[in-house]
Amino acid sequence: MSIELKMPALSPTMEKGTLARWLVTEGDLVKSGDLVAEVETDKATMEVEATDAGRVEQLVIAAGSEDVPVGTVIALLVDTDAMANPGPSVYDNASVIDKSAATATEAPAVEPSRSIRSQPVLLETHSPSPSPSPRKSPADRIKVSPLAQRIADAKGIDLSAITGTGPNGRITRADLGLSPAFEPDPIPVHSASVSTIEPIAPPPAGVPVETVGLSGMRRTIARRLTQSKQTVPHFYLTARCNLDPLLKLRAELNASLAAQDAKLSVNDMLIKALALALGEVPDANVQFGGDELHRFGRADISMAVALDGGLVTPVIKDAGTLSLSAISRSSKEMAAKARDGKLLPEDYQGGTASISNLGMYGIDEMFPVINPPQALILGVGAGVEQPWKVDGHIALATIMAATASFDHRAIDGATAAQFMQALRELIDVPLRLVA
């Protein structure tokens, strides 16, 4: 009996992936949980586990293949247990192999010898029970991924009443009926909007040009931001903020944190200000849901990180309750993981609002594109010294333009204005960030 290993969906929005390399060869014996391949997504390179035990019969998709759709069969395994124990298959939709009941004459599974990078496993898989137990009848056996089993144990969910939708009827996290936090479906592209897109023109003749294929990340950015501008009614508000009090507080805090080898950035403090402003104006911390409006109970801030050939947006979760030093540590860790291609799906999925800071490049002002399905993104420019009213007098001050893009389907102009007012007050009086 052949077992199909399919290209997994490693994130809610993943549609295709690049099969970077195989970690096994044809003829290798693998067991459930063994790493078998590396898959590149638009965000990172991740490793894939075998969902069943068996011998690798055929590597259907060659290493290096790009744009492999999710669900495509990438390899075939031979069910060695079914071959050793003729009779009704134990890989039906309601059963699972009980390794402890194998006979003493059965050959043990040999883990293939290979060098594997240590990476967290992202695909839900089945692992054999660690302790021996009597063989159950096929009707009593349940196939369930380790993640789903842990969640079920923690929440007291009865798995016997659930029909699995995973490989060979395996119960996965999605089958438990739990709504993942802030992981809505991507915005659909309607045929009406697609039909209005102008055809892509070739480069002009006679001009020296180098043409290179788009990376998976760049294709995803192009698709999602095109969808955003086509389907989300953007409107923009700008608030000019006096940065001098924030810069003074930052210098004082960094001096006190020097012994801890910690250093706050302006962006860390702006992330905190954004999160607190969303807490003060909860009607801005929302997401459009068709016939519904989702209002979030905390502020998870997606932070734009520039990479070679694109950007990613790792999430600082519940930023409003974190200290500035905690935000600083988290943002540095996320940025390093992003640049090393080691972000996990939970690192970049979700987010209730985004921040994109181009101030370090000397950009005066920016009008960012909303990161769907979010309804708000804050764009930050550089602090520019200019005349300003300070303590009732005209003096030079460091002024920063903060421009937010709003989804008008979810946020009205007055609500957006209240949010920008709250944000400016937090920046102008930064002691509230540490209160």
Image (cartoon, rainbow, N blue to C red):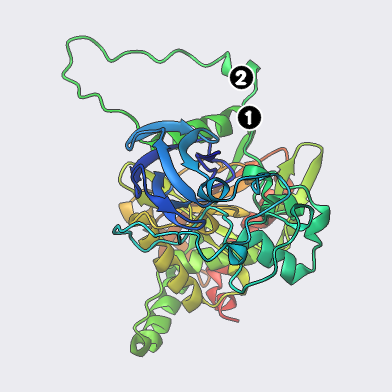
| Nearer-N-terminus badge (1/2) | 2
**Foreground residue among 248 and 117:** 117
Q: Nearer the viewer, residue 55 or 232?
A: 55
Q: Is residue 416 above or below residue 116?
A: above
The residue under label 2 is 193
| Left or right: 156 as drawn, with respect to 276 | right
- The residue lying toward the viewer, choosing from 82 and 403, is 82
Location of residue 153 in the rendering, given as x and y in whole percent from the top left corner: 73, 69
Q: Is residue 13 above or below residue 105?
A: above
Q: Is residue 412 visible?
A: no
Q: Around disc 1, counting alpha carbons within 10 Å, would you say few (fewer than 14), some (14 to 19), or many (20 or more)?
A: some
Where residue 405 appears, x then y in whole percent? Answer: 58, 44
Label drawn at residue 231: 1
Quarter of the image for the N terminus: give it.
Answer: top right
Left or right of residue 150: residue 390? left
How many numbered marks have been drawn onto this rendered protein structure?
Answer: 2
Residue type beneath disc 2: Ser
Kindly indicate the quadrant of the structure image that contains residue 359. Answer: bottom left
Task: Name the residue rendered at 56%, 73% in the picture.
Answer: 429
Q: Residue at x 40, y 33 (%)?
A: 61
Are dots 1 and 2 in contact, CB under 8 Å?
yes
